[in-house]
Amino acid sequence: MANHKHLTLSDRIIIEKGLNNNSSRKFMADNLGMDKSSICKEIKNHSFFKRFSRSGVSSCGTYD
């Protein structure tokens, strides 16, 4: 595991590329030498996109 507490910009870029390539959280964690939970927390805490369900409709949207 890495000795530093915070992720660097290059770490975040690797995570972003992994997300764009649909890589698993475990695969990204192994490449960065971190625990999978650290990757999951980083994604959860620093995501700013709107999440959609598999149907493509926002799961938090209003109903007609």
Image (spheres, helix red, strand yellow):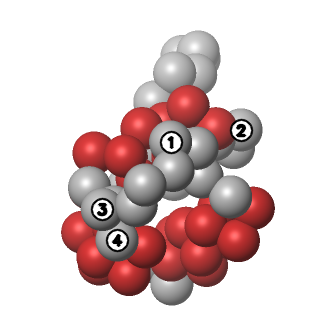
Q: Nearer the viewer, mark 2 or mark 1?
A: 1
Q: Residues within 10 Å of mark 2 (few under 14, many from 20)?
A: few
Q: Residue 5 location, x and y as percent? A: 50, 42
Q: Is residue 7 above or below residue 23?
A: above
Element at badge 2? Answer: loop
Q: Earlier in the sequence, mark 4 or mark 1?
A: 1
The residues tagged by marks 4 and 1 sit, at their Cα atoms, a distance apart of: 12 Å
Say what amino acid the circle numbered 3 marks.
Answer: Met
Q: Nearer the viewer, mark 2 or mark 3?
A: 3
Q: In the drawing, what numbered circle is on residue 53?
A: none
Q: Is residue 52 left or right of residue 3?
A: right
Q: In the drawing, what numbered circle is on residue 1?
A: 3
Residue beneath disc 1:
5
Q: Earlier in the sequence, mark 2 or mark 1?
A: 1
The residue at 37%/46% (across/down) is 38
Say what amino acid the circle numbered 1 marks.
Answer: Lys
Q: In the drawing, what numbered circle is on residue 33?
A: 4
Which image quarter is the N terminus in?
bottom left
Q: Is residue 56 visible?
A: yes
Q: Residue 6 location, x and y as percent? A: 58, 44
Q: Is there a contact, CB below 8 Å, between mark 4 and mark 3?
A: yes
Residue beneath disc 2:
48
When asked about the image quadrant of residue 58, the answer is top right
The residues tagged by marks 2 and 4 sit, at their Cα atoms, a distance apart of: 25 Å
